[in-house]
Image (cartoon, helix red, strand yellow):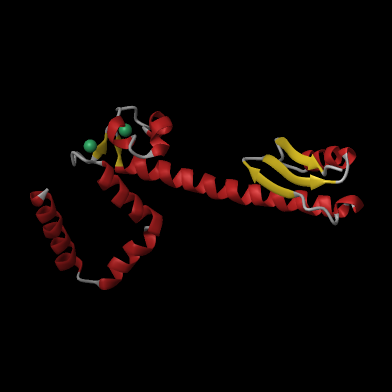
């Protein structure tokens, strides 16, 4: 550990004396997005034996890799190097951002569609979406409205399933 740090510092020293141009450092900073330098940190934290690669046991400390270790291990050597780790995390984060964006788009489309229906304007129907599954909840006046709300939600682009937890107001 100690040797390793010393080695890094001497490397840094080499880079600085060799270039001693601050703009080069800035250029390197711009190329790495903030997430990627976080991935370097989290990789190091997971790599408990400091082998510069993550065994399945090491990687599995992070929930994402319990299931996805094999998918992330591109060269199938039963370990993740920094590149494999960063690439998979980046890919995952991007997919996650896309999913959240598309889920919230679905939610607002369902809400807008419900509001267009005369009977629902005054209703307090709550809409949440996860991975294309829409959950409807709240109270409606009639059984017909309950079914109608489900139909409206199901008709929205990108909706894969509707979970209808609406309840008809008791008399
Ligand atoms: Ca390791
Ligand atoms: Ca690998």
Coordinates of residue 3 in the picture (x, y in percent)? 8, 50
Foreground pick, 152 / 16? 152
User: Does the rendering let one see residue 32?
Assistant: yes
- Left/right placement of residue 78 relative to residue 2 reads right
* Residue 85 found in image quarter: top left
Instruction: Tell how many labels.
Output: 0
Q: From this view, report whether residue 15 is shown above or below residue 84.
A: below
Residue placed farthest to the front in the image? Answer: 171
State the residue in front, 149 or 4: 149
When the figure is inspected, residue 35 is found, relative to residue 75, above or below; the finding is below
Q: Position of residue 108 (x, y in %)?
A: 72, 53
The x and y percentages for residue 151 are 83, 38
Ligand 1: quadrant of the figure:
top left
| Quadrant in which residue 17 is drawn | bottom left
* 161, above or below 83, in the image: above
**Residue, x 82% and y 53% (percent of image)?**
123
Q: Residue at (37%, 45%) from the top-left corner?
A: 86
Instruction: Name the residue at 34% across, 63% down.
Output: 29
User: Would residue 49 be found to the left or right of residue 2 on screen?
Assistant: right
Please state, as top left, top right, bottom left or bottom right, where the C terminus lies in the image.
top right
Residue 155 is at least partly visible in this image: no
Residue sitting at 36 percent across and 40 percent down?
62
């Amino acid at each position: 550990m100690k040797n390793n740090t010393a080695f890094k510092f001497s490397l840094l020293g080499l880079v600085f004396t060799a270039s001693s141009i601050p703009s080069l450092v800035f250029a390197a900073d711009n190329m790495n997005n903030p997430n990627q330098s976080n991935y370097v940190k989290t990789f190091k934290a997971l790599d408990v034996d400091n082998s510069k690669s993550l065994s399945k046991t090491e990687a599995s400390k992070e929930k994402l890799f319990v299931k996805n270790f094999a998918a992330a291990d591109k060269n199938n050597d039963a370990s993740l190097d920094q590149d494999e780790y960063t690439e998979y995390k980046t890919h995952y984060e991007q997919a996650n951002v896309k999913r959240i964006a598309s889920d919230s788009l679905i939610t607002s489309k369902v809400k807008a569609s419900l509001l267009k229906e005369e009977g629902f304007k005054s209703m307090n129907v709550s809409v949440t979406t996860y991975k294309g599954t829409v959950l409807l909840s709240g109270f409606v006046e009639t059984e017909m409205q309950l079914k109608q709300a489900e139909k409206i939600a199901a008709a929205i682009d990108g909706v894969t399933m509707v979970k209808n937890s609406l309840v008809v107001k008791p008399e």
